[in-house]
Image (cartoon, grey):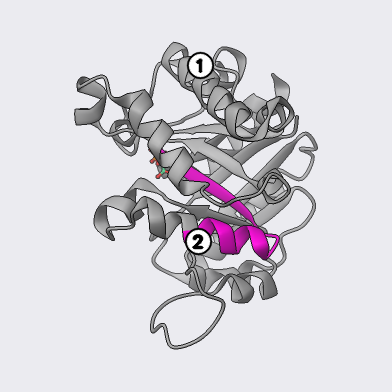
């Protein structure tokens, strides 16, 4: 299966010039990488200026709205994203859930529209520290997956990517143990299999995200069986990000 490395720049950098610098340096660094799909998800306003994405360097958005058009001040339609050459959309990121009160129903509406528009949602799920301490990880993940995918047909789900991002690992420097990520990976495949059948479970990419760097990235592929990673902080450090990509590419 194709490998994925997704860069979530969040609300960074603070100038377009710096965004272009990071993007162009990354583009140069991945020029000879063939076996990985690298997706850059910059702030919306940078998308139009980074359109020169080519080959296996693709553009993603960090969010979108669940309606195609209309009176929704401040929101972004998936149709606008498509027009800008965007292929992927991160949905359900824990920062959207926690800071912007996005619940499973809202995320479900977004996933359905993004799939309908033939964009590829990177559907983020994950338990927080309290839920982990209370051993509720699997209960939380199952609810997030099933509610997020309510009403999504087997035909449409083929463009879906799932990213397991334990909230306690995001931006904390406390990356998840690969054995734990492996258990979650197996659990998620079981849920997808029960809902959509074994074939879909085998072909749906499952990624890990949370404090990934060039030192800890490999076990997520080699031990946890993930087919990709979602990288936040480290994706803004071009040298480190290219090192992550090359490490995965050579493995
Ligand atoms: C993220 O926000 O999706 C993420 C994985 O961040 P970081 O790599 O900084 O933990």
SS category of the residue bearing label 1: helix
Quadrant of the rendered structure where residue 80 is? bottom right
Instruction: Measuring from the top left, give residue 18's x and y in whole percent.
Output: 49, 63
Q: Which of marks 1 and 2 is nearer the N terminus?
A: 2
- Determine crowd level at label 2: few under 14, some 14-19, many 20+ residues with C-alpha closer than 10 A: many
SS category of the residue bearing label 2: helix
Quadrant of the rendered structure where residue 36 is? top right
- Tag nearer the camera, 1 or 2: 2
- What's the mark number on residue 110? 2
Does 210 lie within the magenta span?
Answer: no
Instruction: Measuring from the top left, give residue 84's x and y in whole percent.
Output: 66, 73
In this rendering, the answer to whether 158 lies above or below 35 is: below
Q: Name the residue under label 1.
A: 182
Quote the CA–CA distance across marks 1 and 2. 28 Å
In this rendering, the answer to whether 134 lies above or below 17 is: above
The residue at 51%/39% (across/down) is 230
- What's the mark number on residue 9? none
Q: Are marks 1 and 2 in contact (CB under 8 Å)?
A: no
Of all residues, the one furthest to the bottom in this rendering is 71
Is the residue at mark 2 in contact range of ligand 1, meaning its CB lies under 8 Å from it?
A: no
Instruction: Measuring from the top left, give residue 68's x and y in whole percent.
Output: 56, 77
In this rendering, the answer to whether 126 lies above or below 76 is: above
Indicate the quadrant containing the C terminus: top left, top right, bottom left or bottom right. Answer: top right
Report the span colored magenta.
109-125
The residue at 64%/28% (across/down) is 227
Indicate the quadrant containing the N terminus: top left, top right, bottom left or bottom right. Answer: top right
């Amino acid at each position: 299966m194709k490998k994925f490395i997704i860069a979530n720049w969040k609300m960074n950098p603070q100038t377009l010039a710096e965004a272009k610098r990071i993007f162009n340096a990354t583009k140069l660094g991945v020029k000879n990488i063939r076996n990985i799909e690298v997706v850059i998800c910059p702030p919306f306003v940078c998308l139009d200026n980074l359109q020169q994405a080519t080959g296996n360097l693709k553009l993603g958005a960090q969010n979108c709205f669940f309606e195609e058009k209309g009176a929704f001040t401040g929101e972004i339609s998936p149709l606008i994203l498509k027009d800008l050459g965007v292929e992927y959309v991160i949905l359900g990121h824990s920062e959207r859930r926690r800071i912007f009160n996005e619940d499973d129903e809202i995320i479900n509406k977004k996933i359905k529209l993004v799939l309908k528009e033939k964009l590829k949602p990177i559907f983020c799920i994950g338990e927080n520290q309290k839920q982990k301490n209370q051993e509720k990880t699997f209960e939380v993940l199952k609810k997030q997956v099933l509610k997020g995918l309510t009403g999504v047909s087997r035909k449409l789900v083929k463009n879906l990517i799932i990213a397991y991002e334990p909230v306690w690992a995001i931006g904390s420097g406390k990356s998840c143990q690969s054995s734990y990520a492996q258990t979650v990976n197996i659990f998620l495949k079981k849920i997808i299999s029960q809902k959509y059948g074994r074939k879909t479970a085998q072909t749906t990419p499952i990624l890990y995200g949370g404090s990934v760097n060039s030192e800890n990235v490999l076990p997520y592929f080699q031990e946890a069986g993930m087919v990709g990673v979602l990288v936040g902080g480290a994706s803004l450090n071009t040298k480190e990000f290219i090192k992550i990509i090359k490490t995965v590419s050579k493995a």
